[in-house]
Structure formats: structure tokens, C-alpha cells
Image (cartoon, grey):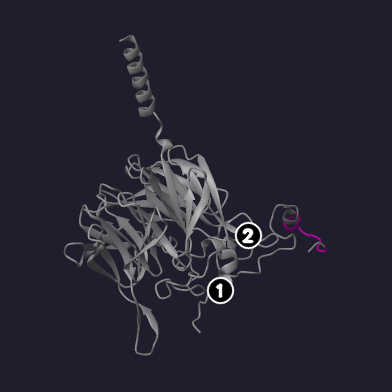
Amino acid sequence: MQHMTRNALICAALLLVLAAAPADAVQRTIFAGGNHVMVIDETTMSVVGQIPVQKHIHQLVADQTRGRVYAAHSGGVEIFDAASYSSLGLFVDEAARRLELSADGGTLYALTHPILVNDAGQEHAGEYAIRIIDLEQGKLVGSVTLGYDIFDAVVDPVSGKVFAMERFDRTLAVHGLAEGKRLGTVTVSADLDPMKTNLLHFMSRSADGEHIYVPQHGASACVFDVDPLSGASRAIDLGGEYFVRDAQVSPDGRSLYLLTADQLLVVDTAGRRVSASRGLDEVYIGLDVSGDGRRLYLSNPLHGDGTAGNLLVLDAGSLKERGMVVTPGMSLFTATAIERD
Amino acid sequence: MKHLKPLNMRAMKLSGESDRPDVFGYACSICCTAWAPGWENGESGNVDPCPWMSDLSLCWVTCYWTGQVADDNTEPDWLDDCSLVSEDWVRICVVPD
């Protein structure tokens, strides 16, 4: 009996230790893109594989449920198996710029557009559209046409709307996912000061669908917080002159990360202010957040003497460096990560 | 440039800034006003004070290089052959054959 009691205590102690194990023990495989995909083991911070693509990759998105990575690139929306590093084909075979995965992981939204050829043999861009992909069925199930010259678009499944940024405009066009047509316009900023730059195509959305964030860089750098339901827009002052290169919202919606030319800014979305920042010694071009919100991935097309790109991995809470991977011969623009068992 | 001698106060001030790159030219803060690869090397070997190579994928829209780099709307594959921007930029074909 005494022996069993001691073993029970040991087991209980072990369970307590395991339960208290930090989430940093999570192992991830990072997929980073330039015109190919580099596969990086986040634990060892080393390149463990490469997926040949030969397309300019704008964005990579991880599907943790299915163990896949989706790429929006110049040739379409491509699917990669995260375990075998192999291509599983294309969902869409026209130029894709942006992807969004629904909160339930069942739908993939892709901003794409075709390249058309007129009678004179000249190529021109066709109308942009949000392609709706049912991931359970594995196929395209719908489409919402947005129009020409769309620089960015955010899909908000909660409100059922698409917010599209059109060229040289300080408004967002609003389209209905169910209606399949344009519903109206939201004015992000009525300030028509010609010295201010245009709104930026680094829009992001909170997971609860209550906020669309639209950065504005330059001397009066700020982020516009747009309510998708009412269309009301309020500016969050960044307190300085910044040239924004990317922006992402944390999965819990509490933080908005902004990548500028020489700093990473953290905006407290509830407090509507910059709550933290970290200086950067190189010019990073891409910012991505891990699915659990614990890691930030900064992609750099030109590292050091210019013979490589690099990926900087930061702790999302402390902004401290967790590691860096140099990719000789490969410029990096975007990254995502899959958690391994 | 070593044979030049500063004659006024401004020139003396500039010549005393030893950390200043030889060439500024198109650099505008941490941005670039134009895409002009290859000319930025200064006498002391400073290479590229302007991060044009880092910005190359962005400046068809967020900057005003629209007259110099390809429009990603019409030429979405213009960077397909660019594995390393610093070397492969020469492969970018912005004017169709």
C-alpha cells in the first residue's frame, strides 16, 4: 500500500510538471516564401527542405487542421502538404495576392484576378474577385467580383462583407458575400490633404469581425479602425513618421503588429495606442503571426551583404528574438508555421 | 573626392561627417525616390544607402516607381525569376519582348 501511494504521488507530480510545461515547448515547422518555399525547423532554426515553386509568393497561410499550407502566388492558389513538402495542386489558376482562412478553418478566401488578352494580343488585368473555396469539399464554390485595380481586400465572414481598397481612394468598397455584389462605400478618412499618402494595402481584421485595420504611413502615420457593421472609422495615432511595410492582428485581437522600415510597433487595440516597439537593424518586408499568437515571423529579402534573405523569429509577447534563419540565395517575403506533434 | 577642400562653413561641416555615405542621391529617409540600381557605390565603397532592393516587391504600388517597375496587376509574374533580389533583378523583364 505504501509502495502504491508513493507511485501515485510520483505520477501526480509528473502530471503537474507536464501541465505546467510552457507553451514554448510547441514545435513548429515554418514555411517561408520568396519564389520558392523554404521549410524551416523552428526548434533548430535550420532549413530542412525546399519546395520548388518558381512563382512570386505573396502570402502563405497554414491550415493546422488539414496539415497543409496554402500559397497565394503569381500563378494561383497552390496547396502544399506540410509533412511531405509536396504540391497537391491548385485551387485557382489565376494570379492570387491574398488569402484568408475562416475562423472555423472550413473556408479559404482568395483575392485573385485573371490576365486577359485583347484582340491585339495585348495582356491586361481582368477584374479582381474573392474566390470562395470550401476546404472540406476541396473546391471553388463561389466568387464575388470586386472590379479592376483592387490593391487589397479583407473578407469579414462575421458581417458577411468584403472590404476592398481601390486605387487612389480613401474609401473602401463594400461587397456582400451572400449578395455577390457591391453594397456601398465606407469612408476611411475624409482628410484629403494631398501631402498625406494613400491608404495602404496592408489591411487586417480582428477574428471577431469587429475591426478592420487600415494603416496610413508617412508623416501622420496612423491606423484607421473601421467598424465593419456601421462603417465608422477612427484613427489610432502612431505618434510619429513611419513607413509601414506590413500589418497583422494577433489571433486574440488584442494587438496589432505593424512592421515599419526600422521598427516593429505593437498597438494595444483596446487602449488605442502604441504599447511597445522594437528596433530593427535591417529592412524587413513581411510580417506574419503564428496560429497560436506566440511567434512573429519577419521576412527579409536582403540580409547582410545581400547574398541571402533571412527570417527573424520573435516572441510575440516580449518581442525578444527567438532565433534567425539565413536563406542563402533566397529572398523572403512571407512566412507561416504549422505546429508539429 | 579627397582633393576637394571645403571653403565655407557648410562644406566644412559636411566634410567632418565621417560616417556620412559618399552618395545619398535618390535616398529619401529610409526610402528611395527612384529605382536606379548600380550607381549608388560611393568612393569609400558604401553600397546602396537606399533600400531599393528590399522594397522592390512593394514599390509598384506603395511608392511612386510606377513608371519604372512592372505593374503587378498586369504583370503578376514579373518577380517569378527573382530568387535573390540583389542578384536576380537583372532578370526582371519589365518591357515585354
The residue drawn where x is 32% and y is 40% is A270
Labelled disc at residue B91: 1
For the N terminus of chain B, the quadrant is bottom right
Going from the N terminus, do you reach mark 2 or mark 1 first? 2
Q: Residues within 10 Å of mark 1 (few under 14, many from 20)?
A: few
Mark 1 secondary-structure assignment? helix
x 72%, y 60%: residue: B45
Q: How far across and how far down the image is residue A161, in percent?
A: 22, 59
Question: Does the image show residue B35?
Answer: no
Q: Nearer the viewer, residue A288 or B66?
A: A288
**Vertically, is B60 above or below A299?**
below
- Is residue B43 toward the left or the right of residue B79 in the image? right
Q: Is residue A148 above or below residue A80?
A: below
Residue A203 percent coordinates (x, y)? 35, 56
Is residue A286 or residue A181 the one in the foreground?
Answer: A286
Chain identity of mark 2: B
Dominant secondary structure, magenta: loop
Q: Chain ID for label 1?
A: B
Q: Quadrant of residue A90?
A: bottom left
- The stretch in magenta equals B3-12
Type of amino acid under label 1: Arg
Whether residue A100 is visible: yes
Where A5 falls versus A51 (above or below)? above
The span from disc 2 to disc 1 (Cα, nearest Å) is: 23 Å
Residue placed under numbered mark 2 in the picture? B49
Instruction: Pick whichever, A269 or A138, lies toward us.
Output: A138
The answer to which image quadrant residue A305 occupies is bottom right
Comparing labels 2 and 1, the label whose residue is closer to the camera: 1
